Amino acid sequence: MTGGEIAAIITAIVGALIGVSGVFISIATSHRAAKKDEVDSLCRMVETLQAENARLIARIETLESDLEQREQRIAMLEKSLRETTEARQEREQRIKELETEIAELSTKVAVLEAKRRR
């Protein structure tokens, strides 16, 4: 789940909670029997939910930033690994070429020594 999806879910949940608390506030204010302290309590709850929503959104932004930095680091490491692997393969190829050259030269030396002994 991406940070954006998490943010959307959290925003939806907090929005729903704010909406529900808004309904409570409406009900409380529409009924003459509602006490002022109940309304104040609901207002504080809404403020608390809004503050928590802001905190969660900031946390999601931080996590998204961290994720982006990690993805960049992974991309760099993958590139470095590819380059290192290519260099190793080139060295291995060069070693094979040199081994072939050495074998050919050894054969030539053996032929020349054999001719010289005759």
Image (cartoon, rainbow, N blue to C red):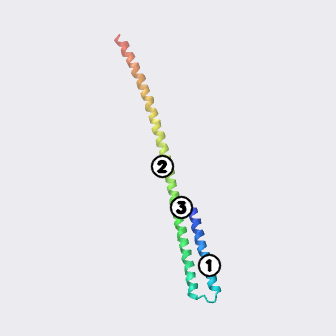
Residue identifier under label 2: 77
Between label 2 and label 1, give the one nearer the viewer.
1
- CA gap, disc 2 and disc 1: 50 Å
Foreground: 10 or 115?
10
Foreground: 16 or 99?
16
Say which quadrant the N terminus sits in.
Answer: bottom right
Percent position (x, y) of residue 43? 57, 81
Residue drawn at point x = 60 percent, y = 75 percent: 18
Percent position (x, y) of residue 24? 61, 80
Q: Which mark is residue 101?
A: none
Q: Residues within 10 Å of mark 3 (few under 14, many from 20)?
A: some
Q: Which mark is residue 64?
A: 3
The answer to which of marks 2 and 3 sits earlier in the sequence is 3
Residue identifier under label 1: 22
Residue drawn at point x = 34 percent, y = 12 percent: 117
Q: Quadrant of residue 26?
A: bottom right
Between label 3 and label 1, give the one nearer the viewer.
1
Which amino acid type is marked by label 1?
Gly
Q: Quadrant of residue 3?
A: bottom right
Which amino acid type is marked by label 3?
Glu
Q: Secondary structure at mark 1?
A: helix
Percent position (x, y) of residue 9? 58, 66
- CA gap, disc 2 and disc 3: 20 Å
Q: Secondary structure at mark 3?
A: helix
Which amino acid type is marked by label 2?
Leu
Relative to 31, is 82 on the left or the right? Answer: left
Establish if 107 lies above or below 91.
above
Residue drawn at point x = 65 percent, y = 85 percent: 30
The answer to which of marks 2 and 1 sits earlier in the sequence is 1
Percent position (x, y) of residue 116? 36, 13
Say which quadrant the C terminus sits in.
Answer: top left
Establish if 40 lies above or below 10.
below
